[in-house]
Image: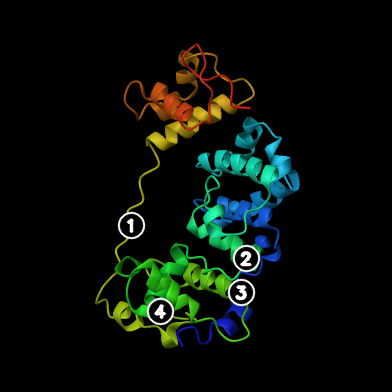
Amino acid sequence: MWTDGLAGWYARGGRHHLPWRHTRDPWAILVSEVMLQQTQVSRVLPRWRPFIARWPDPGSLAVTPLIDLLRAWQGLGYPRRARDLHRTASLISATGWPRDERTLRALPGVGEYTARALLVLAFAAPAPLPRDVNIARVTARAALGVEPEETRPSGLDAALASARPPRMSRRCFVFALFDAGALHCRARPLCAGCPLARGCRSRERLASGARQPSRLRQARYAGSARQLRGAVLAALLGPDPPRDLGALELAVADVAAARPAGAVAASVDALLAEGLLQRAPAGVATRIHK
Ligand code: SF4
């Protein structure tokens, strides 16, 4: 089996220090999953515990004004995640936790992966295993001998469903695959020392250079519209927010210099459309959604 050796390797070399692996609380797990969606582990690590300490359950976040959450979220990026988490907290505190994939996916910001992660990691439900980028890549390569984009999701699900090593819990199996993907089976794989090397169906192909995996080109952040939107939001969340568009343009001038004329106003419009700001008569948002 392609996962032979995984259990022992995980016991010895897994990332057991990650604090969200030591809870089954669905809220704590959801917060970690949302934070990790687009932010590196190293940046989430110092932020997760304080977040859970401040908002230990959905109800505590639901009664918090969104502006406070957005301020606490600064530095993690992609604040739409915070907005969605806020909405999800309100729904859960009103109606409780959904217990199936379809209903979980109806929550804002919860897709197939996050729904399955909650079902398997928090609720111990017999759901299909969650498949993030790392797990999809390691499974496609090791089990099927292809890159993830060369197979169907159902093929990955089937490969995962039949590969859990005996005496390894579903939770630990997921954690171990996360780790094999993050530490070894990266876009450019580090096959030496990989716990799956012995049974991997891609090792020879990748080692021989027969097919180098394509690298996704990371969109440049510096000078991007996303960077400007972040700067605009940060300025408006500050203790003394700019009162009009001119003051706002001044506050973000460094970042806006790389963007076309009108970009600051366009950023405000985008933030308004995303529900992160509330429209204000002066043409610039001065108050955030409550
Ligand atoms: S042996 Fe290489 S290609 Fe196979 S799973 Fe490990 S890192 Fe990935």
x then y, percent, for residue 207: 32, 79
Which one is nearer the viewer's eye here, 114 or 75? 114
The residue that mark 1 highlights is: 216
Residue 101, given in percent of the width and then of the height, sits at 54, 59
Can you say whether 58 is above or below 255 in the image? Answer: below
For discs 4 and 2, the disc positioned in front in the rendered view: 2
Q: Earlier in the sequence, mark 3 or mark 4?
A: 4
Residue furthest to the top in view is 282
Taking the image as shown, residue 189 lies to the left or right of residue 29, namely left
Number of residues whose C-alpha sits closer than 10 Å to that of mark 1, classed few (under 14), some (14–19) or many (20 or more): few
Q: State if disc 2 and disc 4 touch (CB < 8 Å).
A: no
Q: Residue 121 carries which label?
A: 2
Kindly state the secondary structure of the residue where label 2 is placed: helix
Ligand 1 within 8 Å of the CB at mark 1: no
Which residue in the rendered view is the most extreme toward the left? 210
To which quarter of the image does residue 54 belong? top right
| Whole-percent x, y for residue 18 in the image | 64, 63
Work out whether mark 4 precedes mark 2 in sequence or the reverse, and give the earlier one. Answer: 2
- Provide the residue designation for mark 4: 142
In the rendered structure, which amino acid carries the disc numbered 2?
Leu
The residue carrying mark 4 has its beta carbon less than 8 Å from ligand 1: yes
Q: Is the C-beta of the residue carrying label 3 under 8 Å from the nearest atom of ligand 1? A: no
Label 3 near label 2: C-beta < 8 Å? no
Q: Which of marks 2 and 3 is in front?
A: 2
